[in-house]
Amino acid sequence: MDYLSGIYTQMLVVGLRLLFSPLASNIVVRTACCSVGVVLPVYSTFKAIEGRDENEQKKWLLYWAAYGSFSVVELCTDKFLRWFPLYYHMKFAFLVWLQLPITDVS
């Protein structure tokens, strides 16, 4: 678990740098949202399945349910939401928040 905590810490630092960077364009933040929203959770989900830890499996199942629901809503409203300032920054922060082991919100 220490290895994943280190990954989460590094992800948080990178996320905060992107969030507070005034030069970050929407393309960079949108790519980061896709990467953070899928890459690490896929890895963590496979680790939970391989480890047969039911609590971890449940946690990641809830994450994917939240991520899928958010994606469906976003699919329908993206044409309007992308015009809001810092929308993708807020989405990125939301995805990072869902994955944090400290909060265990998903």
Image (cartoon, rainbow, N blue to C red):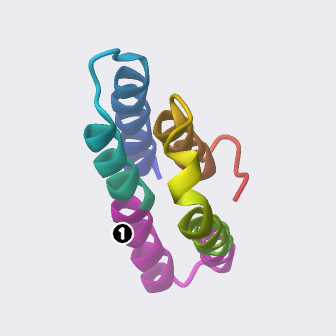
Q: Nearer the viewer, residue 22 or 46?
A: 22
Q: Nearer the viewer, residue 59 or 35?
A: 35
Amino acid at pointer 1: Tyr
Please give the name of the residue rendered at 39% of the width and 65% of the height, measured from the top-left corner.
Answer: 38
Looking at the image, residue 74 sits to the left or right of residue 47; the answer is right
Can you give x and y, in whole percent of width and height, for residue 98 in the image? 62, 51
Crowd tier of the residue under label 1, counting other residues whose Cα lies within 10 Å: few below 14, some 14–19, many 20 or above:
few
- What secondary structure is the magenta-colored segment mainly? helix
Can you give x and y, in whole percent of width and height, for residue 53 in the image? 59, 78
Q: Nearer the viewer, residue 38 or 88?
A: 88
Please give the name of the residue rendered at 33% of the width and 46% of the height, measured from the top-left corner.
Answer: 32
Residues in magenta, as a range? 38-61
Residue 59 placement: quadrant: bottom right
Compared with residue 10, is residue 68 higher up or lower down, i.e. above or below? Answer: below
Can you give x and y, in whole percent of width and height, for residue 26 in the image? 33, 38
Looking at the image, residue 3 sits to the left or right of residue 103; the answer is left
Q: Secondary structure at mark 1?
A: helix
Please give the name of the residue rendered at 34% of the width and 15% of the height, measured from the top-left corner.
Answer: 22
Compared with residue 89, is residue 42 higher up or lower down, i.e. above or below? Answer: below
- What residue did someone put label 1 on? 43
Can you give x and y, in whole percent of width and height, for residue 96 in the image? 52, 44
